Amino acid sequence: MLGDLVRVVSARGYGAWRGEVERIGGCSHPRKFRGSTRWVDGAGRVVREFTSGSLPGGVLLAPCQNRRASRCPSCSRVYRGDVYHLVRAGLTGGKGVPDTVASHARVFVTLTAPSFGPVHAARSAGGRPVACRPRRAGARCPHGRSLGCWEVHDPGDPQVGAPVCRECFDYVGAVLWNAYLGKLWHRFVTYLPRALARATGRTHAALRAAVRLSYVKVVEWQARGLAHVHAVVRADRAPDLEAPGGGPGPAPGWVTPEALGRAVREAVDAVRVVVEAGSHGGRVLRWGGQVDVTTIPATEEPGSSEGERAARYLAKYATKDVTDPDLAGQDPGTPRGAHLARMAATARDLSALPGLGRIGRHARTLGYPGHVTSKSRAYSTTLTALRQARARHRTGPDPGPGVRRSSAWRLVGHGWSPGQALIAAEVARDAVINRAAARDAGGGAGAAPPGGRVGLRAVRGQAEVSGARSAPSCSSFRGSGAGR
Ligand SMILES: [Zn+2]
Ligand SMILES: [Zn+2]
Ligand SMILES: [Zn+2]
């Protein structure tokens, strides 16, 4: 490795190469492309050209765009920044969304899974840690295990999330719940307009004619291996009433945040999904009783603190390793590790049943199929649009009307040699330090960095190049690395 490092650093053109590494933010697993983008005018003349031949090593480096911090710290930070911008634009405007969205009725919602059996938990009351499960001494489950636990667990305690009795825990129900979370959500958003019609004293048809509901959601894991959902739900004017090109307008005044909150609770209560699991019997899946609905106050100012807070919160969860809920990092010798391993095994077992075959494919995510984040079309901009804006920043704006852009890029490899990887990691670390320094110097948005100085600019890649892989769809911005 040292020999390789010396070779890399002493090679001719090292400075230019390092500049390219900085441009992609020190991505740990970049893709390498050869090709060109040409801008051609009406007469067929090439008015501008950008080719890999002019770059160090004759290749264009593009960031891997992996969402997971464990795979690529640099791209994960970019993804978090993008989610932040996307969520925030839908709350306070910007990125092509009118600032008036800040005046729409909107709520921040957390939906959890129900209980599938008692688990150890790090609890607190009034800010003070308290005992896990204080129960009458001698209270036992049907398997003879004590139902009480008088320990005060730290959140990092390997018991946290593990069942008090594994025989009592409904593993089949828990895995099915993860597997059908998407369906539970879909039914929730289907019921929501009806519930809002009731909450506002309108007919369903009258509501639909006047109001459209937009949302963005992020899935997070609980210690017990069950997913839950954080979401923003926003009331817009119905699209038919929209001015052409005007973006979402506010819903009528009778759609208050309070009515929206009541509707959310009613819709949550109404959702049922029935699943047959062969000899395990059927399960009626529903949302858990722990539903949190918070009104995001309407504000006059774009960039309000409430909108910022919600955006940061969702962005933070979006880059947690949702596709890998600490499963790989868990020691199966610990109570929680053994619990998660049993959930994964249950997912594999269930896939032998008719209609449930897909669950086994998602055993590593405990049955959950892996869409981390999704939004309705109208909520705000898309990740694709944010990436394209970055690519335009790199290649400059299109030269004007009548000029056509044509791109031809071919993937020719990826990754680093051992010595290159050391330098890329150093560049990624420097980018973090530069960004923190820029933030301390004033501006910047805390947990989720919008455009930083040195590092972030460098991280930004090439949308037209990334199109060579499957681009994320507009309505579902799962992490580009989620399926791998
Ligand atoms: Zn990367
Ligand atoms: Zn306990
Ligand atoms: Zn038991």
Image (cartoon, rainbow, N blue to C red):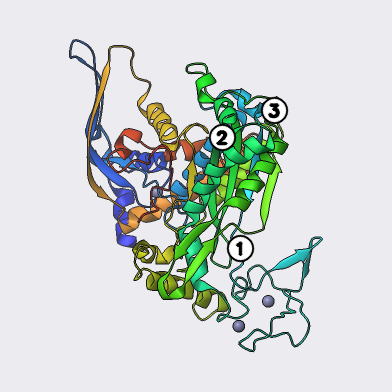
Percent from the top left, x then y, of residue 435? 56, 41
Q: Earlier in the sequence, mark 3 or mark 1?
A: 1
Decide: marks 1, 2 in contact (CB < 8 A)? Answer: no
> Is label 3 in a helix, a strand or a loop?
loop
Residue lying furthest left:
44
> Is label 1 in a helix, a strand or a loop?
loop
Residue pointed to by mark 3: 254
Residue 308 appears in the picture as rendered: no
Q: Residues within 10 Å of mark 3 (few under 14, many from 20)?
A: few
**Could you say which is closer to the camera, residue 113 or residue 16?**
113
Please state, as top left, top right, bottom left or bottom right, where the N terminus lies in the image. bottom left
Q: Residues within 10 Å of mark 1 (few under 14, many from 20)?
A: some
Please state, as top left, top right, bottom left or bottom right, where the C terminus lies in the image. bottom left
Vertical comparison of 237 with 474: above or below? above
Disc 1 Cβ-to-ligand 3 distance below 8 Å? no
Disc 2 Cβ-to-ligand 1 distance below 8 Å? no
> Is label 2 in a helix, a strand or a loop?
strand
Residue 83 appears in the picture as rendered: yes
What amino acid does circle 3 point to?
Answer: Trp
**Could you say which is closer to the camera, residue 364 or residue 154?**
364
Residue pointed to by mark 1: 114
Residue pointed to by mark 2: 213
Vertical comparison of 125 with 296: above or below? below
**Could you say which is closer to the camera, residue 185 or residue 228?**
185
Question: How far apart, in angstroms, are the residues tagged by discs 1 and 2?
Answer: 26 Å
Question: How far apart, in angstroms, are the residues tagged by discs 3 and 1?
Answer: 33 Å
Q: Residue at x 44, y 73 (%)?
A: 346
Q: Residue at x 69, y 85 (%)?
A: 140
